[in-house]
Amino acid sequence: MDGYTLTHKTPTRKDFIDTADFDQSEILDIITLSRTVRDFIKSGGYLNSLFHKNLAMLFEQKSTRTRVSFEVAMEQLGGHALNLAPGAIQLGAHETIEDTAQVLGRMCDMVMARVDRHESIEALAKYSKTPVLNGMSEKVHPTQGIGDMITIFDHWPEGKQAKDIKVVFVGDATQVCNTLCDMTTKMGMNFVHFGPTNHKITDEWLEIGRKNVEKYGGSCEWSDNPDAVEGADFIYTDVWYGLYDKETPKEVYMADFYPKYQVNIDLMASTGNPNCKFMHCLPANRNEEVTDDVLDGANSIAFDEAENRLTAQRGLVLYFGGVAQATLDYIKDQRKA
C-alpha cells in the first residue's frame, strides 16, 4: 500500500465498538491513514477535513489520554469536541442512555464514549444516527488498540516478518489485554498472555485470537510459566487494579501478582532479547506492575505509545467521519505540489 489508497473507501460498519468487528484489511486502512496524517501534520501540514464537524465525548470514567487525544485531534482537523463529563448532562439523572444517544446523534456528527459497562456503548451505537466510537469499556479498549499497533509498526524489529514477532502481555487480563490479543493475532503475530490462573484471559478471547491465527498466521496462548516471555519482541503490561476494580483491595491484587508478574529489569532480561521493547497503556502504578528503571529505560516505548493515541484518534475520526480517502488525496496532492 502506498499510504494514500485505502482498501475500504468507507467503513464497513457505522460504529467503532470493538476491533474484533473488523478484518485485517480495514484495521490496516485505519493504521495507514493515521500514520500518513501524523507525518503530514508533523511536517507542518494543515488539515480542515472536519471543518464544522462536532464530536460529543461522554465520560463515565476519568480520562487523560482519551480525552486529550480526541479533543486535540478534532481541533487539528478543523472540528470541535464537546467534553460531556459526569454530571454535566442529564445522562444518569433524568435521561436514559437511549434518549441521550438519539439527541446527540441528531446534534453531533460523531459520539465517543468511555463507559462503565459495555452494554452502554452498544446502546449508544444502536440509538445514535451518527457513528459511535468506543473510548473504553470494561470489555475492550479499541482506540488504545489502534494506537498500540501503530506503535508496534513504528518500532518494528528489523528484518522480521509478522510471523516472527512475539508480543507478551504480562499480568491482569484487562480490556487492553483482550484488544491486544485480537490486534496482534489479526496482524499474524504471536500473542501470549503471561498471568495467574485467576486473572487469565478468557476462553472467549483466546478463541477470537486462535480464529485470527487460522486466517492470518501466528499463535495465541496463555501461560503462567515465566518461560513464556522468552524471545519476546514486546513486553506489555497494565495496572493490576484499576478503574473497574474499586471494590477489590490493593493487597489482594498484590498477593496475586507480586513479584512474579512485575515487569522489572530481570523479567526484561529473561526475554533473552536485548532489543525487547516495553509497552504500557498508562497510567502506571510505578514500582508495582512495572519498575521505574523499565518504564523510564531506553527500551521503553510507553510514551511513544501514549502519543500515538493522538495518531490513532485522528485516523478514527477521519475514517468514521467519512472523509478518510479525501484527506489522503489532499495530502498526496500537497506533497506533489
Image (cartoon, grey):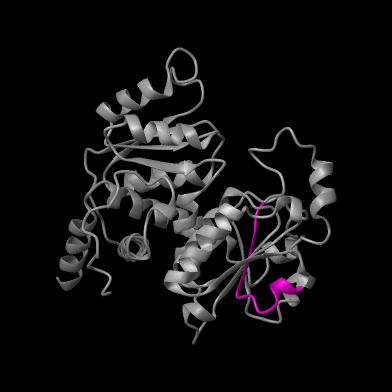
Residue at position x 44%, y 54% in the image: 20
Residue 135: image x %, image y %?
A: 46, 43
**Quadrant location, the C terminus:** bottom left
Residue 281 vs 153, above or below: the answer is: above
Tell whether 138 sits left or right of 30. Answer: right
**Quadrant location, the N terminus:** bottom left
Tell whether 222 sits left or right of 144. Answer: right
Q: Quadrant of residue 125?
A: top left
| Foreground pick, 230 / 264 | 230
Residue at position x 28%, y 41% in the image: 79
Residue 175 vs 237, above or below: the answer is: above
Residue at position x 24%, y 64% in the image: 6
The segment highlighted magenta reads 227-238
The answer, for residue 151, to whether it is visible in the render is no
Is residue 230 rendered magenta in the image?
Answer: yes
How many numbered discs sit on the rendered protein?
0
The answer, for residue 24, to whether it is visible in the render is yes
